[in-house]
Amino acid sequence: MISSLNPHRGGRAARIALIAVAPVLGVLAAAVAPRLAAAQQPPGMAAPGMPAPSAAPNPLNLTADQKNKMKAIQFKYKPAADKLREQMRALAMKADKEMMVILTPAQRAKLKQLQAAALQQQQMMMSGGGGGARRP
């Protein structure tokens, strides 16, 4: 997918494509993303990268009843959020197909290389092999 590339490493066409698609996807993602991670988890489980509910800070001093009601609201809207996520994915795929037509065969080959490199880097980061300085 073109949208997964770093715009600083792609060609001019890839950057233009990202600029065209990014605002739409960015608005949708910004509206949905904060709730998706929490809403995808069953009650009592933390979203990836988030502390477990029992260890989560509670600066509002929510009661157990309030927390349960919040979780119920998250689950209430989960289907709509899932639908939006699928619409975003479909939109990105449609845009990618249109943008691929614009690229020359050489540019498409280069794009594949860049995507593979970006995927490899992302996998390294996810596995903890980011290569940066580590804290003790």
Image (cartoon, grey):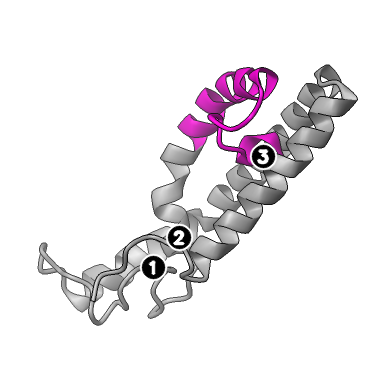
Q: Are marks 1 and 2 in contact (CB under 8 Å)?
A: yes
Find the magenta span and give its range: 1-28
> Is disc 3 surrounded by few (<14), some (14 to 19) or many (20+) residues within 10 Å?
few
Mark 3 or 1, nearer chain start = 1
> Is disc 2 surrounded by few (<14), some (14 to 19) or many (20+) residues within 10 Å?
some
Of tags 3 and 1, the one toward the viewer is: 1
The stretch drawn in magenta includes residue 18: yes
What numbered label is drawn on residue 49? 1
What numbered label is drawn on residue 87? 3
Q: Nearer the viewer, residue 5 or 22?
A: 5
Question: Which secondary structure lies at badge 1?
Answer: loop
Could you tell whether 108 is left or right of 121 in the image? right
Could you tell whether 79 is left or right of 32 in the image? right
Q: Is residue 125 above or below residue 113?
A: below
Main SS of the magenta segment?
A: helix
Q: Quadrant of residue 115?
A: top right
Q: Amino acid at mark 2?
A: Ala
The quadrant in which the N terminus is found is top right
Q: Is residue 39 above or below residue 65?
A: above
> Is disc 1 surrounded by few (<14), some (14 to 19) or many (20+) residues within 10 Å?
few
Q: Is residue 21 above or below residue 126?
A: above
The stretch drawn in magenta includes residue 6: yes
